[in-house]
Amino acid sequence: YALVVTLAVFVCLRRWVFSPWGYSLKAIRDNRLRAQAMGIPVNHRLMAAYTLAACLAGLAGALQLPREPAHLQMDMAMVVETFVVVVTGGLGSVGGALAAALVIGVIHALGVALVPEATLVLVFLTMGVVLVLRASGEQLGWGFQLQSPWVVSGLAVLFTLIALNLLGLFEVGQLLPS
């Protein structure tokens, strides 16, 4: 059910971001006084945005509880994972955040299965590779833009698997069913 909730939240966020409400929030972010002069109810929109953010944070916590029991340090693991996903996917990119969440989740699962002691290193290595590739922003020969979150995420997974293979920590045969 987490996949259904994730897709529903993604679709709703995309609709909100590209609606007049989302554009008014972007105007408030860029210049609050100018937005207020244009007649946008700044305080009302900010309160609605903070309320939406709190609801999404509560939903994220509710989706986290079936994965592991509640404990006092639960928020620290979520903060680290969220930071990596947001930085990898790009600020302000809902699609990039979704792509990064999928890639970081796969990298984390592979790390737990293959090299449990280096899982966090793999996640941050993936983030570093994405940041290096995204900073260049060069055009690939096939017409793909390196700034596309799907292309960058796919390359990050590929480079991480190659690095693990070179270190002798991963073999392609481990992914195939026996």
Image (spheres, rainbow, N blue to C red):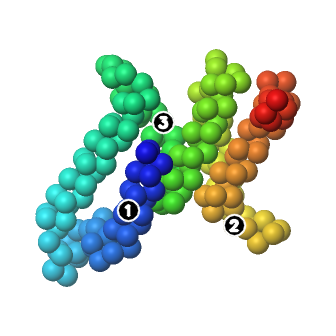
Cβ atoms at labels 2 and 1 below 8 Å apart: no
Q: Where is residue 129 in the image (x, y as percent from the top left)?
A: 68, 44
Q: Position of residue 17 (x, y in %)?
A: 37, 68
Residue 130's label in the rendered image is none
For label 2, the residue is 145
Q: How far apart are marks 3 and 1 (CA)?
A: 20 Å
Foreground: disc 3 or disc 1:
1
Q: Which residue is at 48% across, 36% downward?
A: 81
Cβ atoms at labels 2 and 3 below 8 Å apart: no
Foreground: disc 2 or disc 3:
3
**Tag 1: amino acid:** Leu
For label 1, the residue is 13
Residue 81's label in the rendered image is 3
Who comes first in sequence, dot 2 or dot 1?
1
Residue 30 versus residue 61 in the image, above or below: below
Residue 75 versus residue 52 in the image, above or below: above
